[in-house]
């Protein structure tokens, strides 16, 4: 039986594009632990980190025939993990905002002063960061995250390519992560208690 462990990433990627499941299995074994560790460091949730890694590998396999990797395979996979973890954090933030709005409308008395201050500070920081984005990047982010349009719908609306939409979202999420880094662990802990 052929041993894939000595193959380069480039060779494995090429073989995967030819439907070689064993080559895919080798990539999976080679990168799973590193990708899981990267995801877990960002979101501190074992199950969610596993799901993110699984989603990245599933997408990698499903798009094996049309996937173009311009950097190294490792860099591509790590970038995919980073994008998905930031996306999850941002989605959890949107869910938190929604649930807190519902809670405020239905049970306003139960909100503590600390929760209100925390949410107000987080909202203000988010708004300042979004307002500081370049105009088109800001518009793409708002259409995606506040109006829930797909990348394709945004591309059509703004007459730009889907790749440009992805680039703007990646840039916006990177800035959000950088500016909110000190609050991310607090947000996640808050989410866990709220959504449990």
Image (spheres, rainbow, N blue to C red):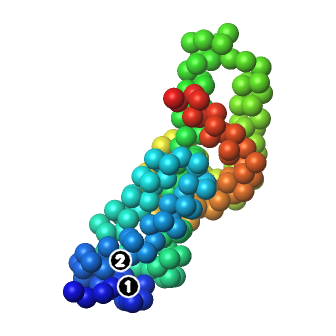
Instruction: Return the x and y of residue 9 as percentages of the image width and height.
Output: 42, 84
Q: Which residue appears at 58% of the width and 49% of the height?
A: 43
Q: Which mark is residue 5?
A: 1
Q: CA distance from mark 1 to mark 2?
A: 7 Å
Q: Is residue 1 above or below residue 109?
A: below
**Residue 91 placement (x, y as % from top left):** 53, 43
Kindly indicate whether the residue at mark 2 contacts the one at mark 1 (C-beta within 8 angstroms): yes
Q: Residue 107 appears in which quarter of the rendering?
A: top right
SS assignment at label 1: helix
Residue at horizontal 71%, vertical 31%?
119
| Image quadrant occupied by the N terminus | bottom left
Observer able to see residue 133:
no
In front here: 123 or 71?
A: 71
SS state under label 2: helix
Residue 77 in sight: yes
Look at 57% across and 28% down and name the residue there: 194
- Which of the numbered marks, if any, corresponds to residue 171? none
Q: Using residue 22 as the reference point, say whether residue 40 is left or right of it.
A: right
Indicate left or right for 3 with 150 as reference: left
Name above or below for residue 68 compared with residue 184.
Answer: below
Q: Position of residue 158 (x, y in %)?
A: 51, 57
- The residue that disc 2 covers is 26
Residue nearest the viewer, comparing 50 with 121: 50
Q: Residues within 10 Å of mark 2 (few under 14, many from 20)?
A: some
Q: How crowded is the residue under tag 1: few (<14 C-alpha within 10 Å), some, or many (20+)?
A: few
Q: Residue furthest front?
A: 1
Height in image: 186 above or below 138? Answer: above
């Amino acid at each position: 039986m052929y041993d894939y462990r000595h193959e380069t990433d480039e060779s494995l990627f090429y073989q995967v594009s030819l439907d070689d499941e064993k080559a895919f299995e080798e990539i999976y074994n080679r990168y799973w632990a590193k990708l899981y560790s990267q995801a877990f460091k960002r979101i501190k949730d074992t199950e969610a980190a596993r799901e993110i890694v699984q989603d990245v590998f599933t997408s990698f396999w499903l798009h094996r025939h049309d996937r173009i990797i311009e950097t190294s395979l490792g860099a591509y996979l790590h970038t995919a993990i980073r994008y998905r973890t930031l996306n999850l954090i941002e989605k959890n933030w949107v869910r938190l905002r929604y649930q807190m709005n519902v809670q405020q409308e239905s049970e306003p008395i139960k909100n503590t002063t600390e929760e209100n201050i925390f949410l107000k500070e987080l909202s203000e920081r988010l708004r300042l960061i979004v307002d500081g984005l370049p105009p088109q990047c800001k518009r793409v982010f708002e259409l995606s995250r506040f109006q829930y349009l797909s990348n394709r719908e945004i591309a059509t609306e703004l007459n730009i390519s889907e790749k440009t939409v992805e680039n703007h979202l990646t840039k916006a999420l990177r800035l959000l992560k950088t500016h909110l880094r000190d609050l991310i662990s607090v947000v996640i802990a808050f989410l866990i208690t709220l959504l449990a």
